[in-house]
Amino acid sequence: MWSPPTSAREAAIAEPLLNVAELSSGYGPVRALWDVSVRIEEGELVTLVGGNGAGKTTLLRTLSGLLPASAGTIRFAGEDITRLPAHLRARRGIVQVPEGRQVLAPMTVEDNLRLGGYARPQGEIGAALAEMYALFNDLRLRRRDIAGHLSGGQQQMLAIARGLMARPRVLLLDEPSMGLSPILVDEVFATVERLRASGTTIFLVEQNAYRALSIADRGYVLEAGRIILEGPAASLMVNDRVKEAYLGL
């Protein structure tokens, strides 16, 4: 049956929010990613798992514009952003929470949050801060404290809240549970689940494959810079290769 041609706008709407095709990247002459393809729909929680040195952080840095792509394309909300500078990607809503938290230690909690919202109109900052304090009560209680004096878990919450202040359309979380005690790991994953329930689109990079896959919609497995498996998270959790290499089963 004949159907009318799809308009450019309808085609853009039909695309995933983030559509990465055959992406390669690296550091100078050293390639770290090879032909990586990833798609993330709006509202999804998608996880990327893999061992140390697999290229997970490299992928996030390439998506956020901190590293250039050497091949392939990155499309976001229907737009090719492969060559777009990092600050313009952030303004479009691609926001990365880096590995190791990287809070501004000499500054207060609230000043860290205000910096996260630097691109927002000043009239919105107060409401945005109130929203973060409602979501992260520990930050509300310590909003005047120096960020470097917070515990590791509190600093991770601050890093996530700082990212949320930028109003992300997709939040890139890089190893949020790294270096935390089991109790704090539980808290971090509970926070990620709350964000997902609120409709935040999340790309979660994690070494803790079991915890990441247990809360994700879909997942990808990265080895030596290449995607070797992908699919619904529940299917990956029962995949023999994933169980043996990443779940310790």
Image: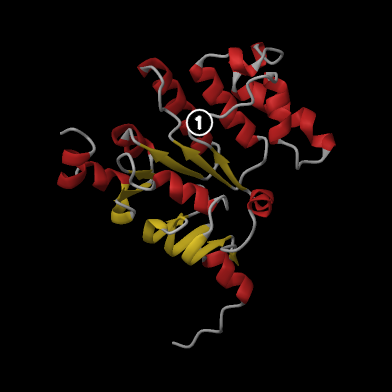
Q: Residue at x 36, y 18 (%)?
A: 182
What residue sits right under mark 1 in the picture? 194
Q: Nearer the viewer, residue 50 or 161?
A: 50
Q: Nearer the viewer, residue 33 or 8?
A: 33
Q: Residue at x 51, y 84 (%)?
A: 3
Residue 9 image point, x, y percent: 63, 71
Toward the front, the furthest residue is: 29
Q: Crowding at label 1, few (<14), some or many (≥20) Cα neighbours within 10 Å?
A: few
User: Position of 219 compared to 157: left or right?
Assistant: left
Task: Kindly state the secondary structure of the residue where label 1 is placed.
Answer: helix
Q: Which amino acid is tagged 1?
A: Arg
118 w.r.t. 236: above or below: above
Residue 61 image point, x, y percent: 51, 48
Q: Residue at x 48, y 34 (%)?
A: 99
Residue 128 image point, x, y percent: 72, 31
241 w.r.t. 110: above or below: below
Residue 110 image point, x, y percent: 71, 22
